[in-house]
């Protein structure tokens, strides 16, 4: 007992304060949850809607999918469990002249009082929804269970047998449309399909789009109507699709639908002066061409093409009909942005108590050659006062960098057809940067240049990235003698990974990336290789080798490796306030040929705000590696293989404040045995024993355009230790040892 007390008081004062805060939070939550006053604002002879249940008497029917048709929902819950907003409201007093009562009622949520009228309307809407799904004889019953002043509402669905489409008849009353459909339209309704409103609406929408893409500018879906006759004694319905002739108004006579062609295409300025784009750029991005048939898809693609041009603020397209003809003039009004902007961004830094400041100045021109080319120059400077660094000269950290980018709003490449370039929403980017870093231990210079392509397919929710050429030259002009002695040249403390990353290095890579996101599922895959082209040339031209047998280019050893990453996220939305996010990430990188170690920037690390949040950045792994020297462990806590698994329950609290509860698992491993990373190599029979686990809570301030995030992660399973107390901190928690706080911008995944 005495030993436990001593370990408790060993905690630092800040952790004692955290404990007191947790105790206070737990006390407040317990008070709110145990409050029996949640019904004190419920009037007499009325009931609090405590719970709503929707079920079906037909096995296998998805009743939960019809929950949106229920008009009244119970009060919201945090994490789908705790009705905290209602409890906060109920704690307030009835005297609204007092500030505290008004504030509690504003923060909280007023009790939902059960309304019989809303219940009847819900039954009607549920029955209509079932009929729209093809259950023509469906019914809905309602039952209520009352306990005290709380009511449990139960909606029971009785779908009965579903109906199907029997015979289908297309009644096309316009001869020209009938001929067009016979030649190039595939009928969407067939016997045996489910008889649902959605099925009928989809066919009407599809047929309308087909005609609007074949010159029928004035056609709309109201010209298409359905008739339905049930077949006695069966669950089949005969469908008639009627496409009526053109009638511009009720008093007008019926006629054939007019079919239009494009006359002139005119470009108009939406500004006070001329359009600040070349004529060729305007024409290339316009899919509406003179003498072509009117097509709705050309209109939409033209809007899309202009919307991605950085120089364009907005686009307005109008069609003007020639009197007594079937010609449409197209007027495209373009309004452009200001071509040049300058931005300034200051920063503050604190690295292990060393305070610093940084600032960046960026100039951007969105229309450099009057073709919506974007050119930017970013200058950045940083300073950090370094203290408590024994054995080194009294020097502070300084960093200066310049980065330039030139982006073209199209593919810039030979051998590509005009049709392909025009069809893809693509950009081409040239980037060049130069970075100077001066530290007490070393000086570092990094030169980078790259040529990249990016394009997208919005309909398929796909985005692509292709790095055709990415060059990085790392130059170390000076390394202090103390740093060399301690970490690079000392026989007793020689670190191969550290030594490799403090030598001059040349990286020439190509890469490809693919991302997909539809709001529910999202994945990202990246693959890159480096050094293969140089290695092929080296063998042919017999490049000079250095002292350890590496081929060199311009007397600098080049890196050779292959790397693959894959990330997947699935979001399950339970209601407007609660969702579950599941994430998995996997990465594998392998050095070969001219390299035995990956460059530091290409190695994986674990821990931090977007990984296993019970650990800080570069504090976990590889494998069961524990760490020895805190000054250089940042480079030892890296690996060649990474696995992340996360599950996070997200809930809306109040105002713009959101909460989260999460469990994270994962680690990194090396593919080779390195002397300074004992226990870090991946073995299939052991890796699952080395998976670290963390849990925690988070708060988010959601301002829509950006999210501020604070996560508190606790270690649950620590693979770096084998003794029971340290290996399972979940059972033996110590805040000083196991707690990590992370502040970040944006969601973790």
Image (tube, grey):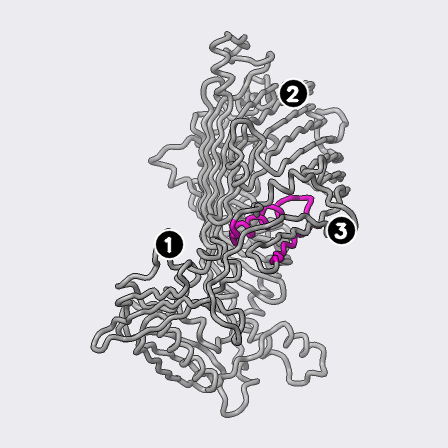
Q: Nearer the viewer, residue 19 or 741?
A: 741
Residue visible at 69% across and 28% down in the picture:
435
- Circle nearer the viewer, 2 or 1: 1
Q: Residue furthest right?
A: 272
Residue 741, given in percent of the width and then of the height, sits at: 59, 50
Disc 1 residue crowd, few under 14, some 14–19, many 20+, Cα 10 Å: some
Q: Is residue 297 magenta?
A: yes
Q: Is residue 404 above or below residue 152?
A: above
Label 2 – label 1 distance at C-alpha: 64 Å
Label 1 – label 3 distance at C-alpha: 43 Å
Residue 528, given in percent of the width and then of the height, sits at: 49, 30
Residue 523, given in percent of the width and then of the height, sits at: 46, 45
Label 3 – label 2 distance at C-alpha: 50 Å
Residue visible at 62% across and 57% down in the picture:
320
The region drawn magenta spans 293-322
Q: Residue furthest bottom?
A: 45
Q: Where, by quadrant of the figure, is residue 445 drawn?
A: top right
- Assign a secondary structure to mark 3: loop
For marks 1 and 3 on the same chain, the one whose residue lies earlier in the sequence? 1
Residue under label 3 = 271
The label on residue 185 is 1
Disc 2 residue crowd, few under 14, some 14–19, many 20+, Cα 10 Å: some
For marks 2 and 1 on the same chain, the one whose residue lies earlier in the sequence? 1
Q: Is residue 308 magenta?
A: yes
Q: Is residue 343 above or below residue 244?
A: above
Can the viewer see residue 731?
A: no
- Circle nearer the viewer, 3 or 2: 3
Residue under label 2 = 475
For marks 3 and 2 on the same chain, the one whose residue lies earlier in the sequence? 3
Q: Are marks 2 and 1 in contact (CB under 8 Å)?
A: no
């Amino acid at each position: 007992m005495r030993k436990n007390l001593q370990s408790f008081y060993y905690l630092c004062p800040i952790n004692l304060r955290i404990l007191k805060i947790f105790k206070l939070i737990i006390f407040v939550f317990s008070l709110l949850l145990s409050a029996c006053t949640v019904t004190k604002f419920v009037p007499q002879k009325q009931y609090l809607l405590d719970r709503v249940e929707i079920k079906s008497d037909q096995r296998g029917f998805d009743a939960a999918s019809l929950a949106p048709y229920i008009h009244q929902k119970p009060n919201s819950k945090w994490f789908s469990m705790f009705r905290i907003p209602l409890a906060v409201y109920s704690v307030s007093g009835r005297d609204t002249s007092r500030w505290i009562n008004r504030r509690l009622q504003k923060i909280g949520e007023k009790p939902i009082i059960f309304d019989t009228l809303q219940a009847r309307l819900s039954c009607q809407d549920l029955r209509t929804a079932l009929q729209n799904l093809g259950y023509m004889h469906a019914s809905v019953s309602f039952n209520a269970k009352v306990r005290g002043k709380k009511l449990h509402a139960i909606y029971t669905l009785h779908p009965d047998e579903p109906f199907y489409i029997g015979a289908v008849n297309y009644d096309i009353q316009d001869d020209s449309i009938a001929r067009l459909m016979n030649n190039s339209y595939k009928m969407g309704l067939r016997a045996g399909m489910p008889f649902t409103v959605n099925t009928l609406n989809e066919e009407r929408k599809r047929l309308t789009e087909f005609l609007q893409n074949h010159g029928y500018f004035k056609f709309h879906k109201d010209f298409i109507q359905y008739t339905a006759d049930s077949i006695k004694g069966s669950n089949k319905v005969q469908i008639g699709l009627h496409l009526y002739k053109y009638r511009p108004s009720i008093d007008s006579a019926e006629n054939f639908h007019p079919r239009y062609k494009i006359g002139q295409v005119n470009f108009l300025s939406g500004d006070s002066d001329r359009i600040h784009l070349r004529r060729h750029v305007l024409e290339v991005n316009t899919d509406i061409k003179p003498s072509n048939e009117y097509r709705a898809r050309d209109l939409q693609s033209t809007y899309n093409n202009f919307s991605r041009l950085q120089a364009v603020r907005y686009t307005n397209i109008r069609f003007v009909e020639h009197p007594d003809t079937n010609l449409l003039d197209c007027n495209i009004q373009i309004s452009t942005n200001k071509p040049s902007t300058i931005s300034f961004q200051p920063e503050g830094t604190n690295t292990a108590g060393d305070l610093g400041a940084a600032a960046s100045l960026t100039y951007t021109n969105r229309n450099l050659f009057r073709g919506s080319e974007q050119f930017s120059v970013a200058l950045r400077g940083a300073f950090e006062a370094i203290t408590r660094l024994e054995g080194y000269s009294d020097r502070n950290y300084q960093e200066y960098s310049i980065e330039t980018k030139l982006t073209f709003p199209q593919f810039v490449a030979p051998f590509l057809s005009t049709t392909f370039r025009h069809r893809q929403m693509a950009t081409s980017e040239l980037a060049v940067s130069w970075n100077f870093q001066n530290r007490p231990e070393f000086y570092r210079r990094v030169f980078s240049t790259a040529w990249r392509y990016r394009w997208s397919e919005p309909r398929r929710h796909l985005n692509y990235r292709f790095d055709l050429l990415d060059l990085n030259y790392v130059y170390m002009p000076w390394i202090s003698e103390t740093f060399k002695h301690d970490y690079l040249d000392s026989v007793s403390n020689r670190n191969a990974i550290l030594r490799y990353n403090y030598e001059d290095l040349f990286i020439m890579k190509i890469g490809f990336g693919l991302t997909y996101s539809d709001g529910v599922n999202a994945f990202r895959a990246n693959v890159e290789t480096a050094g293969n082209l140089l290695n092929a040339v080296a063998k042919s031209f017999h490049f000079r080798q250095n002292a350890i047998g590496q081929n060199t280019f311009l007397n600098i050893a080049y890196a050779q490796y292959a790397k693959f990453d894959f990330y997947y996220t699935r979001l399950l939305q339970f209601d407007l306030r609660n969702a579950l996010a599941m994430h998995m990430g996997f990465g594998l990188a392998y050095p070969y040929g001219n390299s035995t170690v990956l460059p530091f920037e290409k190695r994986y690390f674990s821990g931090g705000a977007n990984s296993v949040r019970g650990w800080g950045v570069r504090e976990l792994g590889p494998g069961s590696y524990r760490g020895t020297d805190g000054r250089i462990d940042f480079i030892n806590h890296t690996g060649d293989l990474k696995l992340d698994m996360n599950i996070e329950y997200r809930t809306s609290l109040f105002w713009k404040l959101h909460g989260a509860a999460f469990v994270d698992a994962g680690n990194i491993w090396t593919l080779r045995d390195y002397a300074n990373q004992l226990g870090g190599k991946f073995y299939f029979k052991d890796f699952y024993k080395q998976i670290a686990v963390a849990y925690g809570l988070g708060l988010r301030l959601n301002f829509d355009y950006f999210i501020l995030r604070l996560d508190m992660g606790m270690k649950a399973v620590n693979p770096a230790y084998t003794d029971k107390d340290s290996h399972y901190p979940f059972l033996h928690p110590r805040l000083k040892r196991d707690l990590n706080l992370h502040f970040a911008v944006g969601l973790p995944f």
